[in-house]
Image (cartoon, rainbow, N blue to C red):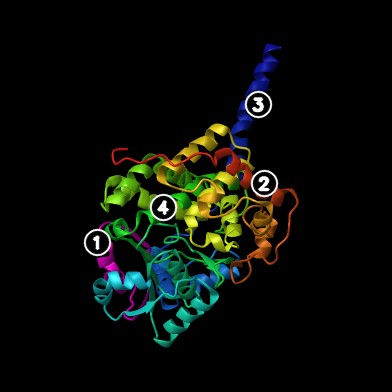
Amino acid sequence: MPGGRRGGASERTSTRPKDLAGRRARHAPTRIPRLTTARASSIASLIFSDPGLLDRRRRSAGKYRFSRRWARYQWVRKPGALGRLGDEVARLNASQPLVLCDLAVQEALATQLEAVHGATIVPFNGEASPGEITRIGDAARDMRADAIAAVGGGKSMDTAKAAAHPARLPLVIVPTIASTDAPTSALVVVYNDDGSFLEYRFFGRNPDAVLVDSEIIARAPVRFLVAGIGDGLSTHFEAQASASTRKVTMAGGPPLLAGIALARLCYETLRADGVAARHAGELGVVTAAFERVVEANTLLSGLGFESAGLAAAHAIHNGLTVLHETHSYWHGEKVAFGVLSLLVLEGRSQELTDEVVDFCLRVGLPVTLEDIGVHADAETLAPVATAACAEGETIHMSRSQSRRTWSSQRCWRPTRLVMNGASSWNALRCCPRLACCIGKRTREPMSATA
């Protein structure tokens, strides 16, 4: 009846405000106490009077560690950036820094390094091994250093990180080559004295300052820049592999959208400017393309792999280090071959594989085993596959493995070598397959106008 319907509608209309009021009460946001100026001042004074307070609170709550030094992080890329080393050390309230540098760097940059007030220069012995890390840590303690600076290549930077972080010393990185993404990351790759891969160590914070002097990098042999392109090339494809499986990244969590975006930007930058940057490096000049590729090699790749993950390309690199004949090739050169192996393992399209192979040929990266001094026979490759597929390696690291192998010392280490059925044999078979598919290609001649 019309009257009944009108009455029903009236009743429903009259009850809705009460329902909405109840729903608003149930879903009302939690009230946050007002932070007065006096309360903010007391909290700030408490924190700065006890620098370890936040670290202890977050460790007790099971959250990520926090360091107030993060607020002081600096990344500078420009010609002449090395001249800021003394200012950066002073900004970190340090007056007796230990400066670790390669022997060749010490000779070439002696004047600029000696200008750093209160610095003690310690030469790097050439390998980021446990013994060398201990030596630098002991030297810093004996001289009562209040900061560590690394001037040189990837292994000297990793050694400085491994010595500075346990001692809670400020760390300044000055890369003289753009061959890896080591400058910005909190990851340390540790090798045995013979150059074979030993373990990863991941620390709770990144370097306090990174000074990228593009003039110095442009004067270095162009092979270093090309090797950095090979290392950066892996960031995008390994980020895709990690995101598809949501495996734990080096930072300890799932792949982040920001990390995946940075990895993609790194790949696009290298594709667009890699060849032009190589030509600039051959001429020893700093161009816009050269600057962009240096940034991709050292910053985009470093942030990308930490926040998006590693996969088979770096595991294959680690496996290749067991062969003595690969020790004369740079990290990024072997990683570039690992990228091609990754594409084959994942069954990527031939068009994508050809695209990456052609890019590697244009910039001068290896595309076959012969290019990195390895003969493609099963007997030679068996230990490579075994090491690449070791328990805990990035080729197949799951969430449970990650939690187990990241110890309280934040050190991820393959504890034993095992053959993992199809995975190891796939890694083994992909190498001859690549050699057969693309071994007949030759590097295209590069002209100065390309």
**Residue 333: x %, y % from top left:** 48, 53
Three-letter amino acid code at disc 4? Asn
Q: How dense is the environment of label 4, judged by Cα within 10 Å: few (below 14), some, or many (20 and up)?
A: many
Q: CA distance from mark 1 to mark 3?
A: 78 Å
Say if mark 3 contacts mark 2, CB within 8 Å: no
Location of residue 41 (image quadrant) = bottom left
Give the mark nearer the N terminus: 1 vs 4: 1
Estimate the spatial distance between the alpha carbons at disc 2 and disc 1, rounded to whole Å: 47 Å
Identify the image quadrant of the C terminus: top left
Report if residue 94 lies within the magenta region.
yes
Q: Residues within 10 Å of mark 2 (few under 14, many from 20)?
A: many
Whether the residues at callouts 4 and 3 have beta carbons within 8 Å, the answer is: no
Q: Residue at x 27, y 62 (%)?
A: 81
Tell me which amino acid carries mark 3: Glu
Region in magenta: 73-100
> Would residue 397 be seen by someone viewing this image from the given angle?
no
* Mark 1, residue position: 80
| Residue underneath mark 3 | 11
Point out residue 293 in the picture as x, y percentages from the top left corner. Answer: 36, 48
Residue extending furthest bottom?
Answer: 142
Q: Which residue is mark 4?
A: 297
Seen in the image, is 420 located left or right of residue 237? right
Mark 1 residue type? Gly
Label located before the other in sequence (4 or 3) = 3
Looking at the rendered structure, the secondary structure element under dot 2 is helix
Q: Judge depth for marks 3 and 2 and give the one in front.
A: 2
Q: Are marks 1 and 3 in contact (CB under 8 Å)?
A: no
